[in-house]
Image: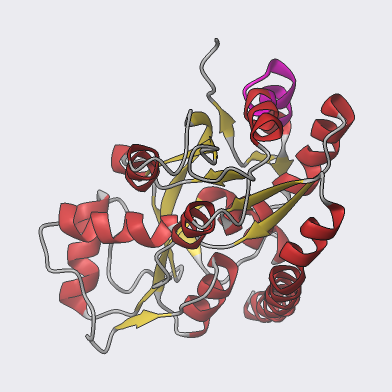
Amino acid sequence: MEGKRSMGNIVCKLFVCMAVLGSGLFLAGAAAQAAEAGEELMMATTTSTDNTGLLEYLMPSFTAKTGIGIRWISTGTGKALKLGENCDVDVLLVHAPQAEIDFVDKGFGVDRRPVMYNDFVLIGPPEDPAGIKGKDVAGALQAIRSSNNVFVSRGDNSGTNKKEQSLWKLADVPAPEQEPWYRQSGQGMLATITMAAELKGYTLTDRGTYIKYESVAGGNPALVIVVEGDPDLLNQYSVIPVNPAHCPSVKYEKAKAFSAWMGSDEAQKLIGDFKLLDKQLFTPNAAKE
């Protein structure tokens, strides 16, 4: 079992290295490529929609239906929102509801449309040294803090990081910062999971990215789900076109077309059918118009 898990860890590390390198190369060249293409839609999105393979699966169908090409930058939701505010992209696909509402209220985006959800889960070593299995998320975080077991945070203002900070508040304990057991990766979700595995610690992840991690590990991951199903762990994803009144050069009509397509029966079925290890990664929930 340990041999299989070690091999899974090696495969996961290789995958994360390739993902990080690929993301870095894409981030470096995406804006220039999109500008050269001119007519393509440029989207900023969270790492989970990219790392899981969802976008590569969905976007050819969007282009086939609408004739609109699309490129995307995969980053934390906080950075994605800033790209929208700075008029560097046309549309967002993100997962931090309150930050999204604030973004729209400030006039940076319009017509926020919820399109799908999954949930967050707490993962950790199978032996569960903090004894959190079966607890609600507030009780689990209290136990991690009191036991000084390692917890690895994204620490990057992403949607996952924003959720984690809200959960410490829910647990009615001070959010950790400099405590020796609390580590901040400053990286994406897959890299953060790999760091937590190396430290035999806990972390918070969205279920979709965890299933991708589990798949890469051949179904035998070093970290397992120990807390799930709490209503406070809902993870909503929404599309937000950038406001043309704020960014006159934005491709607003194309962004509207993307938002409408993501809420369509075609896209919603595709989202629901997207699976790894025969497990559904996202649940469609766009409201019918």
Residue at x 58% of width, y 49% of height: 208
The image's colouring method is secondary structure
Residue at x 32% of width, y 43% of height: 102
Q: Compared with residue 61, is residue 84 higher up or lower down, i.e. above or below? A: below
Q: Can see residue 277?
A: no
Residue at x 66% of width, y 59% of height: 73
State the image quarter where residue 125 is shown.
bottom left
Q: Can see residue 31?
A: yes
**Picture coordinates of residue 166 (x, y %)?**
25, 55
Q: Is residue 83 magenta?
A: no
Out of 36 and 256, give the one closest to the viewer: 36
Residue at x 32% of width, y 74% of height: 129
Q: Tell me the quadrant of the picture where the C terminus can be found.
A: top right
**Picture coordinates of residue 257 (x, y %)?**
69, 27
State the image quarter where residue 220 is shown.
bottom right
Out of 66 and 265, give the one closest to the viewer: 66
**Picture coordinates of residue 262 (x, y %)?**
65, 28
Q: Main secondary structure of the magenta part?
A: helix
Q: Compared with residue 204, is residue 107 higher up or lower down, i.e. above or below? A: above
Q: Tell me the quadrant of the picture where the N terminus can be found.
A: bottom right
Out of 82 and 24, give the one closest to the viewer: 82
Out of 64 and 219, give the one closest to the viewer: 64
Q: Compared with residue 257, is residue 131 higher up or lower down, i.e. above or below? A: below
Region rendered in magenta: 261-270
Q: Residue 47 vs residue 14: left or right?
A: left
Q: Compared with residue 8, is residue 283 higher up or lower down, i.e. above or below? A: above
Q: Count every numbered label the image shows and give the total.
A: 0
- Farthest top residue? 289
